Image (spheres, grey):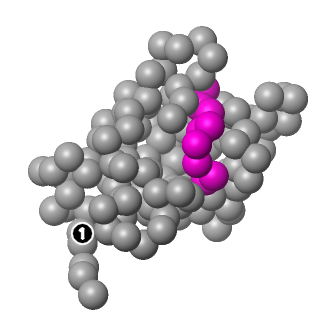
Amino acid sequence: MFVRSLKELESTDRFVDWGNGTSHRLLTQVDNMGFTVCHTVVRAGSESKLHYKNHLEACYCIDGEGEVEDMAGNVFTIRKGDIYVLNQHDPHYLRGGTTTDLVLVSVFNPPLTGSETHDLTNPQGSAY
């Protein structure tokens, strides 16, 4: 058994500022749990086009609000207590709220190595 805190991760490579938010990578591949858990903050007013080609992801909102939009143009408002699931490697837009950050617990399968970063300048969307 082990315990980790967000605060202790902030001074390690498990804390990633990905441009439009931050990711505390609480569990990664080296932890041998078979999945990754991240505390993810999506900054208010931001928009990111993302596509996880190698991972499935589920995101549970624990605070704030924002939106996720699929490539068909369906927009889903995400608020505290909501989960969205990218179960088909779905490309999507992720947006922070108008005035508030979107705070998520993100679970990835298979697990992230922990060194992945976003390229938000890619017109195809940031992918890993």
* Residue 87 locus on image (x, y percent): 73, 53
User: Dot 1, crowdedness within 10 Å: few (<14), some or many (≥20)?
Assistant: few
Residue at image point 59% right, 62% down? 60
Q: Which residue is mark 1?
A: 5
Boundaries of the magenta span: 49-57
60, above or below 1, in the image: above
Observer able to see residue 48: no
Is residue 37 one of those drawn in magenta?
no
Amino acid carrying mark 1 in the image: Ser
Residue at image point 48% right, 68% down? 34
The one nearer the camera, 4 or 94, is: 4
- Looking at the rendered structure, the secondary structure element under dot 1 is loop
Observer able to see residue 55: yes
Residue at image point 15% right, 50% down? 12
23, above or below 48, in the image: below
Residue at image point 20% right, 57% down? 9
63, above or below 93, in the image: below
Q: Residue furthest bottom?
A: 1
Q: Is residue 63 left or right of residue 15?
A: right
* Residue 66 locus on image (x, y percent): 62, 43
Kindly indicate the quadrant of the structure image that contains residue 80. Answer: bottom right
* Residue 24 locus on image (x, y percent): 33, 54
